[in-house]
């Protein structure tokens, strides 16, 4: 090897080393800049009923989702990324909710989807999410129509509604014959949420000897409910199990009962009395006393996660704990379950999320533990019965369960 | 069962009064302006919200509050006419007015959402939940008052239309706008005032609606409009007394059928409309159409 050739090789080696060093520096620089730049947020899409028939619930759901997102973001987000909500208004319309999820997935390219409010909207929306392989975690779609198609992507973090009146039925059946209501009325709004639990309660109470004095389904869209309410009053039933979806329905029945000087021994509604301040404002504190409603959550829950949420809610939105709508907890639970699943998977893959949620794992939420069966129903949700007692919303059933207080029975008369 | 039917009839008559209060403004506006005010449902709800605001914030009773809400709604009606209806001209006026009224409904709904939020509110007063026992029936005071108010308003409108100079102008305009112009009637002024009066009486309907429904929200108007249209068509478009009679008839039929099937009650409500219109297309008290010259 001549000196000229050796010098050339030495120069070549030096050039290669320099290039490698520069490349290393370059990649190092690129890496530094990547870690310095903020990671894009996780985009979560949801359609909510911000106007229309379900607007009161839709807005409560929005608060629940936003409260959760705010809490998560203040603790560093999920997988180190902030959470950003993309919420569209469906005007309480089953056709608009379909359009909204189509847009969220195909146009807005959201990473994840959260469910809407009500079983009526969840059923069509879940089919859209299923078409695109999105996990559909929701908090207000517990009616049988949501699970009937057996979609693998649907997960309801709340209590399946069909059995929600079970603690009440058990309690009624446990009463001594002298105290047990002899007759019962079952007026039901024509809604997939309102009808199944009342029909199931009827099927269990009738064989127990409680005579059915009234059983009818009324259209939900009528402007007033005086006629069916008067028919219930005329039946003189000692127990009323009302299949309702909102405060106005319950309020209208209560008002008509009072006008007819009719006061059942027990009055339970599928929904309405769980709406916190909205219910009290509509019917008054005194008349609310004795009214019952099934649910899985209430603001006084001893669950530490719930207590933290209640504290955060009051700090963010004001008001009092007892004024918090149960919808807030349902929405918040959706976020919590998705958070835990994504954190476990370390991925935003919807397929992976679906697989994990079907694995039988038990997750935690403000409403209590969550574990899904093959249909996506929450197997471990516990049904409680709550009652308004002198302006306080308290847990009364199951009797003897932690947190349950003595039930007010028979229901006090109307305050006038 | 007989007692239940009697009770349903009483409910229907009293409830019909409330619906008449909501429908009478709609039929008056149609009679004079030949337009269907699709915004009537939201105007009823607006009346209810005004009563609510006066009751909650100023502690003014629901009926006393009408002294404020009726004039306020009159001004609103005149303003709506001036801004949305009056500019419409030509052969497409009637169909365009449907769109204009729909736009008005959307705007008002948005304003109500802005001020009152999406939640339900309720009107409260002692006479809403109390009742008087008469002939073995409990008659709620609010329905009795509502029915009396409906009769009084229909009578007042009748006197206005048939016993005043303005009423003659209105009736002339209802019969033939061109002829009314030719005899010196300011048709635009009559139309604006009539629209205002139609919206003003809706304030009473709104109060009654708010007091008898379990609660209302800015969205509640949509549940009302189809029933109100059915009532004024049955009563005869433009007939004020017809609106009262039709409202009582429809709500009574619905209330009686409700004893057997609440779901069929709403079907029968509209089936009754179809049957009556088949026999008498101009409605119960409507004018028979004159042959085109």
Image: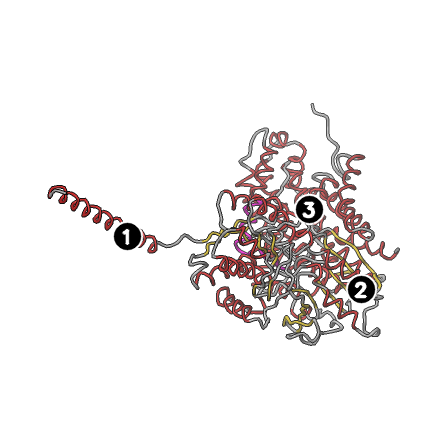
Give the magenta range.
B104-121
- Residue at the left extreme, as displayed: A3
Note whether residue B128 is visible.
no
Q: Position of residue A302 (x, y in %)?
A: 58, 73
Name the chain letter of the residue that bears numbered label 2: A
Q: Quadrant of residue A59?
A: bottom right
Question: Could you say whether the residue bearing mark 2 is in a helix, strand or loop?
Answer: helix
**Residue hosting label 3:** B23
Question: Same chain for marks 1 and 2?
Answer: yes
Q: Nearer the viewer, residue A334 or B174?
A: A334
Q: Residues within 10 Å of mark 1 (few under 14, many from 20)?
A: few
Q: Is residue A78 left or right of residue B78?
A: left
Q: Nearer the viewer, residue B206 or A216?
A: A216
Q: Kindly report the distance in space between the C-alpha atoms of the residues bearing marks 1 and 2.
A: 73 Å
Q: Quadrant of the C terminus of chain A?
A: bottom right
Mark closer to the chain start, 1 or 2: 1
Q: Residues within 10 Å of mark 2 (few under 14, many from 20)?
A: some
Q: Nearer the viewer, residue A98 or A218?
A: A98
- Residue at the top extreme, as displayed: B293
Q: Quadrant of the N terminus of chain A?
A: top left
**Residue hosting label 2:** A205
Q: Quadrant of residue A414?
A: bottom right
**Residue hosting label 1:** A29
């Amino acid at each position: 090897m001549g000196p000229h050739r050796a010098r050339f090789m030495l120069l070549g080696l030096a050039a290669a080393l320099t290039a490698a060093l520069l490349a290393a520096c370059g990649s190092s620089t690129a890496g530094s800049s990547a870690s310095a730049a903020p990671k894009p947020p996780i985009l979560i899409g949801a359609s909510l009923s911000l106007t229309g028939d379900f607007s009161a619930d839709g807005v409560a759901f929005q608060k629940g989702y936003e409260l959760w997102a705010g809490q998560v973001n203040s603790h560093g987000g999920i997988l180190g990324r902030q959470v950003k909500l993309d919420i569209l208004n469906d005007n309480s319309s089953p056709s608009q909710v379909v359009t909204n999820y189509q847009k969220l997935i195909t146009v807005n390219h959201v990473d994840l989807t959260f469910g809407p409010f009500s079983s009526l909207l969840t059923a069509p929306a879940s089919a859209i999410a299923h078409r695109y392989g999105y996990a559909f975690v929701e908090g207000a779609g517990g009616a049988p129509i949501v699970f009937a198609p057996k979609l693998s992507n649907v997960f309801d973090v709340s209590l399946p509604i069909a059995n929600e009146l079970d603690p009440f039925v058990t309690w009624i059946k446990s009463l001594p014959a002298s105290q047990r209501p002899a007759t019962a009325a079952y007026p039901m709004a024509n809604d997939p949420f309102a009808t199944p639990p009342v029909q199931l309660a009827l099927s269990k109470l009738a064989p127990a000897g409680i005579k059915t004095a009234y059983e009818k389904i009324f259209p939900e869209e009528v402007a007033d409910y005086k006629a069916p309410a008067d028919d219930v009053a005329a039946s003189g039933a000692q127990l009323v199990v009302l299949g309702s979806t909102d405060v106005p329905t319950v309020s209208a029945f209560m008002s008509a009962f009072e006008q007819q000087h009719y006061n059942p021994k027990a009055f339970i509604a599928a929904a309405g009395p769980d709406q916190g301040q909205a219910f009290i404002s509509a019917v008054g504190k005194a008349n609310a006393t004795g009214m019952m409603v099934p649910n899985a959550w209430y603001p006084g829950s001893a669950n530490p996660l719930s207590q933290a949420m209640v504290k955060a809610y009051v700090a963010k939105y004001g008001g009092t704990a007892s004024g918090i709508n149960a919808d807030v907890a349902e929405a918040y639970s959706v976020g919590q379950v998705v958070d835990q699943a994504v954190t476990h998977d370390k991925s935003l893959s919807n397929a992976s999320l679906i697989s994990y949620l079907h694995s039988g794992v038990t997750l935690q939420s403000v409403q209590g533990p969550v574990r899904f069966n093959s249909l996506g129903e929450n197997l471990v949700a516990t049904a409680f019965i709550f009652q308004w007692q002198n302006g306080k919303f308290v847990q009364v059933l199951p009797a003897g369960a932690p947190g349950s207080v003595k039930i007010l029975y028979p229901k006090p008369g109307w305050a006038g | 069962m007989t007692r239940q039917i009697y009770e349903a009839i009483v409910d229907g008559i009293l409830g019909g009064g409330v619906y008449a209060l909501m429908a009478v403004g709609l039929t008056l506006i149609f009679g004079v302006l030949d337009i269907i005010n699709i915004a009537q449902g939201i105007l009823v709800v607006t009346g209810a919200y005004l009563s609510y605001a006066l009751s909650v914030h100023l502690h003014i009773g629901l009926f006393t509050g009408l002294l404020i809400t009726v004039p306020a709604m009159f001004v609103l009606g005149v303003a709506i006419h001036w801004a949305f209806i009056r500019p419409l001209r030509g052969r497409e006026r009637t169909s365009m007015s449907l769109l204009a009224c729909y736009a008005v409904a959307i705007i008002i709904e948005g304003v109500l959402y802005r001020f009152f939020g999406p939640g339900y509110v309720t009107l409260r007063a002692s006479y809403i939940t109390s009742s008087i026992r008469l002939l073995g029936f409990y008659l709620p005071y609010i329905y009795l008052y509502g029915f009396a108010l409906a009769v009084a308003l229909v009578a007042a409108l009748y006197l206005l239309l048939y016993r005043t100079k303005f009423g003659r102008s209105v009736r002339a305009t209802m019969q033939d706008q061109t002829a009314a112009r030719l005899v010196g009637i300011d048709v635009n002024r009559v139309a604006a005032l009539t629209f205002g009066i139609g919206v003003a009486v809706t304030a009473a309907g709104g109060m009654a609606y708010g007091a008898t429904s379990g609660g209302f929200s800015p969205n509640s108007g949509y549940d009302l409009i189809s029933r109100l249209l059915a009532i004024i068509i049955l009563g005869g478009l433009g007939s004020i007394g017809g609106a009262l009679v039709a409202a009582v008839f429809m709500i009574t039929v619905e209330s009686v059928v409700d004893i057997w099937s609440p779901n069929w009650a709403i079907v029968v409500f509209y089936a009754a409309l179809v049957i009556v219109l088949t026999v008498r297309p101009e409605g119960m008290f409507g004018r028979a159409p004159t042959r085109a010259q």
